[in-house]
Amino acid sequence: MKSNITLIGMPGSGKSTTGIILAKNLSLGFIDTDILIQINRQKSLQEIMDETNYLNLRTVEEEEILKINVANHVIATGGSAVYSERAMRHLQDISAIVYLEASLSEIEKRITNFGTRGVAKAEDQSFRELFEERQALYGKYAEVTVACNSIVQDEVARRIALKLKN
């Protein structure tokens, strides 16, 4: 097994919360790439997009992911990490990639702050269009997929650990 586990998925799929639980359960470190961006750039994701655009946020995300050089960590990515082939290849080299799969209706139940959350999408793109666009990308990179609809994060973390052990 690779020493790191990377979680990918849509905003609201539970990457950060599940990642913290998984890291604690497996005695691993935890990195959230959205928080890395905010610390290193001294701005929220939404501020980065407001000052430039969503494509710049994706570039910043790629730069931060390419700098990650750790072992024994759970890495929670931003939902748009999958747009960067370079970033995803890097993550594949250092970790097992786990896709937290949640339906559009489940995500819409979980997220209420779309306008301020820093979701990297075109202004004229609906969340449904973004969701549909990303599904193939998540599937392309995932080594393991865990369904997350109506399941608490503790159970998602347990299922990830079980699937990676097998």
Image: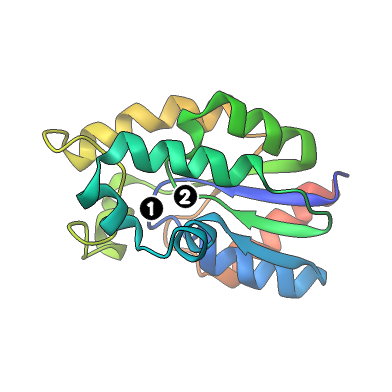
48 relative position to 39: left or right: left
Quick one: 118 or 13, which is closer to the camera?
A: 118
Q: Return the residue found at the far right.
A: 1
3 over 141 or under it: above or below: below
Q: Secondary structure at mark 1?
A: loop
35 over 64 or under it: above or below: below
Disc 2 marks a residue whose amino acid type is: Gly
131 relative position to 14: left or right: left
Residue count near mark 2 (Cα–Cα under 10 Å), binned few <14, some 14–19, many ≥20: many
Tell me where residue 139 appears, x and y as whole percent: 53, 29
118 relative position to 14: left or right: left
Which residue bears the numbered disc 2? Answer: 78
Q: Secondary structure at mark 2?
A: loop
**Residue plotted at (67% across, 28% down):** 89
Give the number of the mark in front: 2 or 1.
Answer: 2
11 over 52 or under it: above or below: below
The quarter of the displayed image where residue 54 is located: top left
Give the label on residue 11, or none.
1
31 over 91 or under it: above or below: below
Say if residue 145 shows up in the picture.
no
Quick one: 65 or 139, which is closer to the camera?
A: 65
Q: Is mark 2 in CB contact (under 8 Å) with mark 1?
A: yes
Disc 1 marks a residue whose amino acid type is: Pro
Tell me where residue 34 appears, x and y as whole percent: 47, 57
**Residue plotted at (51% across, 29% down):** 84
